[in-house]
Image (spheres, rainbow, N blue to C red):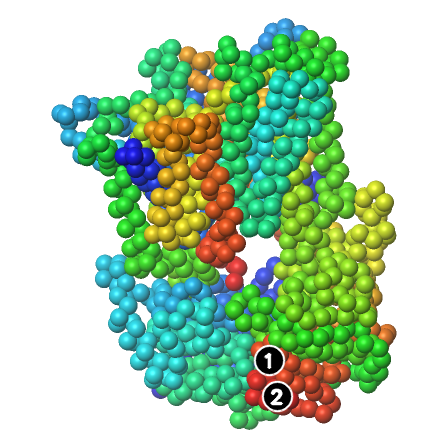
Amino acid sequence: MENQYAIEMLNITKRFPGIIANDNITLQLKKGEIHALLGENGAGKSTLMSVLFGLYQPEEGIIKKDGQVVKINDPNDANRLGIGMVHQHFKLVECFSVLDNIILGVEPNTAGFLQKAEARQKVLDLSEKYGLQVDPDAIIEDITVGMQQRTEILKMLYRENEILIFDEPTAVLTPQEIEELMQIMKGLAAEGKSILFISHKLNEIMEVADRCSVLRKGKYIGTVNIAETTKEELSRMMVGRDVEFVVAKEPAKPTDVVLNVEGMTVASKMHANNAVKNVSLQVRKGEIVCIAGIDGNGQTEFVYGISGLEPLKSGKIEFLGQDITKMPIRKRSVMGMSHIPEDRHKHGLVLDYSLENNLVLQRYFEPEFTNKAGFLKKANIRKYAERLIKEYDVRSGQGPITPARAMSGGNQQKAIIAREIDKDPKLLIAVQPTRGLDVGAIEFIHRQIVAHRDAGNAVLLVSLELEEVMSLSDRILVMYEGEIVGELDPKKTTVEELGLYMAGAKRQ
Amino acid sequence: MNEKKSLLRNDGFQTFVTSIICIILGLIVGWLALLIIEPSGAWGAIVAVIKNFFKYPSAPARLKYFGSTLAKTAPLIFCSLSVLFAYKVGLFNIGAAGQYCLGVALALYLAIVKQMPWFVCLVAGIVAGGVSGALCGLLKAYFNVNVVISGIMLNWISLYGTNLLLKPAMDPSGKDTFRLVNKAKQALLPTLGLDKLFSKNQYVTLAIPLAIVVAVIIWIVLDKTKIGYELKATGNNVNAAKYCGMKENRNIILTMVIAGGLAAMGGALYYLSDFEQWNVNASAVPGMGFNGIAAAFLGGLNPIGCLFSSYFITHITMGGGNVDLSHYCAQIADFISAVIIYLCGFVLFFKTVMNGWLKKSEEKKIARARAAAEEANKEGGNA
Amino acid sequence: MVLLLQYTLIFSSVLLLVALGGCVSEHSGVINLALEGIMVIGALGGALVMKFLPYTHGQSSAFVMFICVLCAAILAGVLYSVLLAFACINLKADQTIVGTALNMLGTALATVVVKSMNTAMNPDDHSSEIKYIDAKKAFLTNIGKFELNWFMIVAVIMLVIVFILLYKTKFGLRLRACGEHPQAAASVGISVFKMRWAGVLLSGLLGGLGGITYITAGVSTWKFENGVAGFGFLSLAVMIFGAWDPFRIAGAALLFGLFRALGNVYNGFAFLKALNIPSAVYNMLPYIVSLIVLAFTSKKSRAPKAEGIPYDKGMR
């Protein structure tokens, strides 16, 4: 009987100093199937894929292709074996054309000179065959994310790869683009390609996959047929217990207006249009208002506008009844505005500073930490840092003097949250506060945010995670292409309805 | 045992060790170069470079030339502090050489042409350097001009500007400016009686203690104060600095003003001590600013370290003048210091190797301890 | 006027060659601040050949001489750039520190070599000069009053070659990918290390050529203590002004070359002479112009995105 598996990873173990990233994991991909790989952040999915691509060498275990044991030492070996991957962060050269990106590494040439005509024809044929519409001459930075993803898929098809890996492919897409992608994946499988679909989104797995393997904390939990399972069962396998998606909290009792935004417009750095268009909203004491939307619809710039990182083109911001439209960042912060930034490495931390110095980043100038002559009071900084570390359970190798760079992502995030919430702000702006964290940390952070609201403060939450939006917020505002297109009550709406607003298919 | 390990792991100690490694490797490369040029005298030449003033048999002569070495160290300390200060804020002040020129220009111009007292000359020099630094900072902050390139351009502009300004201060008998002793006694730096300590070396002046004091101040500012905290934060992550409300553009400009002022102060003090005169037809930017880069990195980017590294570099540069000129040339010392900075670029690599080695030896120790314990267990079982 | 044209063209050729070197290196992702030092070493290589290769003008083959000088300069530049490539690519050293060190080392090394050579030949000679009055004539051709330096033609040929190499070949596509997004290049099996080595060595080749061109521009002796007067950095300014694009760089080089040439020949123009501006001002001119130009062009930089960042396989 012919071997039914395209690729097999048998008993793979990969250790890093301190942790076992993959502990005896087995993954078998049948020819022509769509096989989902499910697991939370940090479950070991990306390590496993790096092993398959030869970026890491496993300590134990073997890889088989069509039943033959193979050795994969680098990505070139993987390419030769017909394994291709659409990475979560696309591997595209932004100032190159679509065609140049597709042929990069396998350029058709005579004596070193590029011969693009033939390649162009092949790309056009492929894009027609699989319904992947692209313009080969468009420059990557000018086209939509969906088109960039199609370029990535064409890259694999152009190389005639047989095993296609999609790493979290839907995170950046609109629901409609996701639907299209699902059709494309089914089409590819029907043509005999074997697909590995890495995701933590249960709905998508249920819709498209034939089988699903689940990882949890570096361990292999099991493989199930999708036709014979339910979402609830998959979810249990993924997190190890029944998940409660609802955060325990009292209904909101909003009172005075804390933040009042009128007609805010912010220019975009990426394109000629405005990123935020004439947005007005209010946030009151004692409520959590959430801005929902697909990544890149102006949420980032909106928050920059409120926190003062970007100037407004027009409009007005009032904070605690005072016009702060042109106020410097420091004054806003002192008045009682805290900002948990979207990108903790870009804005949130000075990575080469110690943890304690990062914890006083918003307060170092206060009399508690700096004397009148301008000298830092290091003893007070240490005491303060030790308190926050204890209260917020920030773990690190050397306590207050650990360099921020040496801390794990989750603990870096906790440090930022400790710093921003401990300021006891009247308004807490939290942008994707739980990105990349494990379940325990997410629960902890959600509890902190709710407690802050209950203490009579306002919270403005920006999140891309629908579960978080639905469970944490008291009021949802959906942002689409820089505009607020709808206001929803989380208790009265559904994820599906929210999705329609986020995709621009519906507006109020 | 534990203490020794923590010392080896201490970052400051590691920096010290890597600096020593750079120096030794640099000297070896220098010696090899001398061997290639003329093998017979190579050892003698490298010894002459290292010995510098120790070659004099009499103690007073040694003291006198030690004084001269110190007098030449002082401006280098200022230049290295200038480079270091900017580097802590994430800027590479290659313009130190030009700022140094401007310090010289204003100081000598006011001293010789305008007959001003020394402190006026000094302050004017510092201001000139500060303004040049500010220009560099402004271009960076508001026009995103690479500081290295603008620094180099300003170096050449400053050099020609200095030549232009000092034309009226030129001694007609040569190409150099007048000696201050002859034409502008009022502008000579006070010696504070230090000259007497160094066998009446009149070039040992206020500049030397001032350099040490300024180094300590820079160390305190960077390490202990609010402004140091802000500047370093800006240097490490300009976005985070902006996010928490620091004025990042002001910090960049302020840093360059201070860095420019420091380099210019070095130049002004050195020429006001009358040790050297400015050649108004100079066609090359003085090496002092570039050597400042070497001293800053060799000193492990620590202000106190800079005191020692500046001394070391001056010591070998002066020693370079003592090589047997019938075969070799004094620039061998420049060659050695250039090799040393090149090696300083590998500091990160050296440290990684060192830490990897420490870790391995530790693991081995643990493995050995475990093996010993098992052995003991076995024996215990047997008995 | 012819003189102005001649000087403009020769200085432009220098700037063009070196800026193209910087351009190739930066497209591969390495900022080459060591161009100044590479120029000095390239010039040294060429000057040594001119000094020692027997040549009598009118009798020996000018072409052979030219090729030997050219190859020596290229070889010297390439060998010297190995130091940069090794430190910045393999050891991931700070590109600014290493570049600066190599600039200082270039001048120091050239001075030590020339001085010890001069001293060895004549114990009283402690100068760092090399003379090549006769040898230089090998690659000069007079067309009327205009003195054509063959390196001007080399510069134009190099311009065309670099353009084709970067935009029409497989190599160029891969090289540019490494400067823009090395992780993407690595993911399709391109060796980022190899491409960056190639980029730096090519910039060594062009920098060396620029160096020899510079010391044959108008003078026939060179004092190596003086290095190359910031021309390596001027070339970087030309490259930035030229937006990392070979033909725009050529335009920028012409402009900067003109300002540099003015410093040499302003005496030939009655109206400039009448202005009675000190020569120091003319000397400053190219640097001032480049500062102003940089101020207006740096804000919207089209620099390769990954330049200056050491490539680490583990980083994704």
Nearer-N-terminus badge (1/2):
1
Badge 1 crowding class, 10 Å Cα cut-off, few under 14, some 14 to 19, many 20 or more, is many
**Residue projecting furthest to the bottom:** A228
On the image, the x and y values in percent for residue B85 come to 65, 39
Q: Specify the quadrant that holds the N terminus of chain A.
A: bottom left
Q: Residue at x 72, y 41 (%)?
A: B222
Q: Is residue A234 visible?
A: no
Q: Residue at x 62, y 9 (%)?
A: B182
Q: Specify the quadrant that holds the C terminus of chain A.
A: bottom right
Q: Secondary structure at mark 1?
A: strand
Contact flag, marks 1 and 2 (Cβ < 8 Å): yes
Residue A506 left/right relative to B3: left
Residue A325 is drawn in which quadrant? bottom right
Q: Identify the amino acid type marked 2.
A: Arg
* Mark 2 lies on residue: A507
Q: Identify the amino acid type marked 1.
A: Tyr
Specify the subunit that label 1 lies on. A
Q: Nearer the viewer, residue A480 or C96?
A: A480
Specify the subunit that label 2 lies on. A
Q: Residue at x 69, y 22 (%)?
A: B207
Q: Secondary structure at mark 2?
A: loop
Residue C155 is drawn in which quadrant? top left
* Mark 1 lies on residue: A480
On the image, the x and y values in percent for residue B229 come to 73, 47
